[in-house]
Image: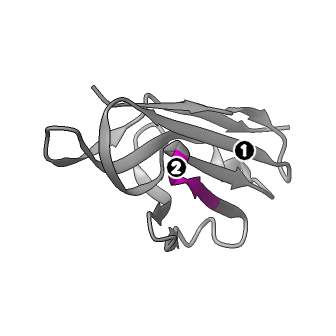
Amino acid sequence: QVQLVESGGGLVQPGGSLKLSCAAAGSIYMIYTMGWLRQTPGRARELVATVTSGGATNYADSVKGRFTISSDYAKKSVYLQMNSVEPEDTAVYYCYADLRATGTFRADYYGQGTQVTVSS
């Protein structure tokens, strides 16, 4: 059983910073990509940023230059440093992993989500 556990969400003022963390737990054979998605009520979940096991990163245009994704694959962890946050960044943020658990096939996994609210 693989679980992704997020932490670090909360309330932050516009222009402020916040760091999200996510750790994968369970019997994992290989992790290919980890990242973050976000969702607001009434809208589809959207990709925020991803990082591959090789270190390649990808960002949504809306967060480029403000958010930084990093990872420690040895610790099966991924992080999202959010700087210069805007009210439009308010959403539930979900950790994501493309991985192969031991004895199973490669699949996508998601965390339970952590709320980020940007408000003064």
Determine whether, in the image, residue 24 is placed left or right of residue 22.
left
The residue pinned by badge 1 equals: 19
Determine whether, in the image, residue 110 is placed left or right of residue 8.
left
**Mark 1 packing: few (<14 Cα in 10 Å), some, or many (20+)?**
some
Q: Amino acid at mark 1?
A: Lys
Is any atom of residue 49 visible in this view? yes
Asked whether the residues under the numbered discs 1 and 2 touch, taking CB atoms below 8 Å apart as contact, a structural biologist would say no
- Quarter of the figure with residue 42: top left
User: Which residue corresponds to the image point at 73% horizontal and 65% vertical from the top-left?
Assistant: 66
* Residue 74: mark: 2
User: Which residue corresponds to the image point at 80% horizontal and 58% vertical from the top-left?
Assistant: 84
| Depth order, front residue of 120/103 | 103
Q: Position of residue 68 (x, y in %)?
A: 67, 62
- Quarter of the figure with residue 90: top right
User: Which residue corresponds to the image point at 55% horizontal and 39% vertical from the top-left?
Assistant: 22
Is any atom of residue 44 visible in this view? no
Q: Main secondary structure of the magenta part?
A: strand
In the image, which residues are magenta? Answer: 69-74
Q: Position of residue 14 (x, y in %)?
A: 83, 48
| Depth order, front residue of 93/22 | 22
